[in-house]
Image: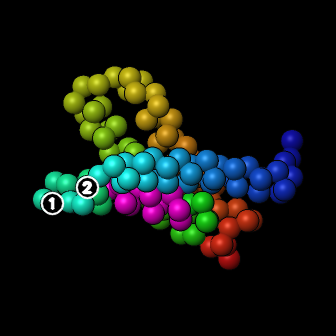
Amino acid sequence: MAVSKARIDWALLLLRLAVGGMAFLEGFAVLRHLAFPGNLNQAMVWGLNLTETLCGVLMVLGLWMPVASFILALIIGGPLILSWLNGAPVLGELHGLFLLLVAFAAALGGAGKWALGRN
């Protein structure tokens, strides 16, 4: 059964808004409560959350979707994979696994018709 191009474009737009919006809100919520970094550890936390916020904005706008989605998947999946390597069950953190899979789906789907970065 074939799906119309309009339905695919709407699905990609909603996926892009959901994943990018989640990344923006999660990163920005942490940045609002952090003090300006005073040492390297605080600067790394600041940089990580600033990168997550920026990737969320790029995804919402549809700019550089493969790069933003891949970086966001690294940010989400890094701690998840490290916990798996240290013996945590694969299905032990379903929320993180879901976010990782959705970020990969957004990367594979692309920006869609209604994006600033489309060809």
Vertical comparison of 118 with 75: above or below: below
Q: Quadrant of residue 87?
A: top left
Q: Position of residue 82 (x, y in %)?
A: 26, 38
Vertical comparison of 117 with 16: above or below: below
Inter-mark Cα distance, 2 to 1? 8 Å
Magenta stretch? 48-58
- Horizontal arrangement in the rendering, residue 8 relative to residue 4 (left or right): left
Density class for disc 1 (Cα within 10 Å; few <14, some 14-19, many ≥20) is few
Q: Which residue is most to the left?
A: 39
43 and 89: which one is in front?
Answer: 43
Determine the residue positioned at 42% across, 48% down.
Answer: 29
Density class for disc 2 (Cα within 10 Å; few <14, some 14-19, many ≥20) is few
Q: Amino acid at mark 1?
A: Gly
Determine the residue positioned at 38% across, 61% down.
Answer: 51
Mark 2 and mark 1 residues within 8 Å of each other at the beta carbon: yes
Q: Is residue 33 visible?
A: yes
42 and 12: which one is in front?
Answer: 42
Q: Position of residue 78 (x, y in %)?
A: 32, 45
Residue placed under numbered mark 2 in the picture: 35
- Horizontal arrangement in the rendering, residue 59 relative to residue 67 (left or right): right
Q: Position of residue 24 (x, y in %)?
A: 49, 54
The quarter of the picture where the C terminus appears is bottom right
Residue placed under numbered mark 1 in the picture: 38
Q: Secondary structure at mark 1?
A: loop
Q: Position of residue 3 (x, y in %)?
A: 84, 48
Report if residue 31 lies within the magenta region. no
